[in-house]
Amino acid sequence: MDPTLTLIGALMLVISIVLSPLSSRVGMPVLLIFLVVGMIMGEDGPGGIEFDNFELAFLIANLALGVILLDGGMRTRAETFRVGLKPALILATLGVGLTAAGAAVVAWWVFDLHWLTALLVGAIISSTDAAAVFSLLQGRGLHLNERVSATLEIESGSNDPMAIFLTLMLVTLIGNNGEHAGWAALTMLVQQFGIGAVAGILGGFAVVELANRIRLTPSLYPLLVAAAGIAVFSATNAMGGSGFLAIYLTGVVIGNRHVRMMPMILQVHDGLAWLAQLCLFLMLGLLVTPSDLIPLAGGGLILALSLIFIIRPLTVALTLWPFAFNRRELGFISWVGLRGAVPIVLALFPIIAGLPEAQLVFHAAFFIVLVSLLVQGT
């Protein structure tokens, strides 16, 4: 193991943490600082680190998102589901589909893509980011109407399966030139949501039972919950379900039951979630080559701004009109549609599958996340 690598990795973490107070002063999301530090340390910046191991990045990103969703789930109260479940689920399913379709039209126009590839870009950028939304709602001392914050929390925690399903379906379609599409897509959708939901709830009760039945050194309880959560996440993925939905629901079950040493579990998991976000955004910053973003800047900006100012507000208005939200609430829900790590992680799927325009798709997704964090996050 090269000691220089561990030194650089540790210094990147230290720099990111030391710079994090800047976020509240400048009014930008802290995740953006982590992303920029990663880009500065990458091959185009003074750091000059060349990192292009997409398989390793994909593995680390999945684990990091699992930890973030577990922590977010444990902080979601059962009352939140009573208040915001219906609007959030409509946004997390139909809303994601509408967002993907709207973004695909713009991507097809600005990047002159094949319609399937344009739909793939739309699917990748269609889900809001749990890490970005949770850190925004918990970290800014916002006092929100309960129904609005409940809708945003549940939406960001549960809309990943739909985006993953659409992305996987389109990657498979493009790879197979569109054969046997409809039936495979429907089966995948039912699998992702069905297995994910059942495994998550059962996994949650199993973790609660395990934690309450065995006597451990207090500091081992948070580690037990983290390891068991990742086990549920991985097992669900292996069964063809959505690991992201499963680990979020596992967290929700744990957070709403009596569990031994719960205050300590939450405190440690807060630190773990921050570490996961730090590593994830630093690594994604390293993975991108900023000079490759410049040719996409014009089209990327049009797509990002269309997503923020037209597609997301229209989607929110169309899907939430039956729930009697007022205009200010709809406006706020539209605005907190932050894109974050999930679209960049999903953009790794086409690269790993070896699709022809995979690099363009990856850089377009990265650029849109950057604009979303800059414009909406601030």
Image (cartoon, rainbow, N blue to C red):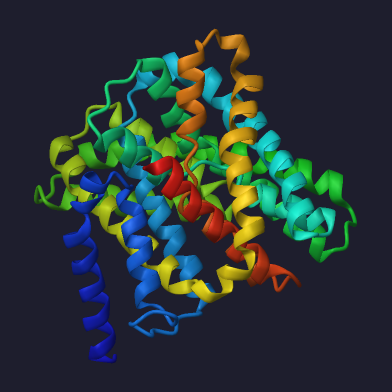
Q: Position of residue 64 (x, y in %)?
A: 38, 57
Q: Nearer the viewer, residue 175 or 340?
A: 340
Q: Position of residue 366 (x, y in %)?
A: 53, 60
Q: Nearer the viewer, residue 360 or 45?
A: 45
Is residue 261 visible to us here?
yes
> In this image, 86 relative to 93: left or right?
left
- The residue located at (63%, 41%) in the rendering is 306
> In this image, 46 relative to 338: left or right?
left
- The residue located at (61%, 24%) in the rendering is 90
Where 232 sits versus 13, above or below?
Answer: above
Image quadrant occupied by the C terminus = top left
> In this image, 209 relative to 122: left or right?
left
Corner quadrant of residue 112: bottom right
Image quadrant occupied by the N terminus = bottom left
Q: Position of residue 271 (x, y in %)?
A: 21, 51
Q: Which residue lies furthest to the front in this view?
A: 298
Q: Residue furthest bottom?
A: 2
Corner quadrant of residue 105: top right
- The residue located at (67%, 29%) in the rendering is 94
The mark tally for this picture is 0
Q: Residue furthest top?
A: 324
Q: Position of residue 221 (x, y in %)?
A: 18, 47
Q: Which of 38 and 54 is in front in this view?
A: 38
> In this image, 186 relative to 132: left or right?
right
Is residue 164 visible to us here?
no
Q: Nearer the viewer, residue 372 or 196?
A: 372
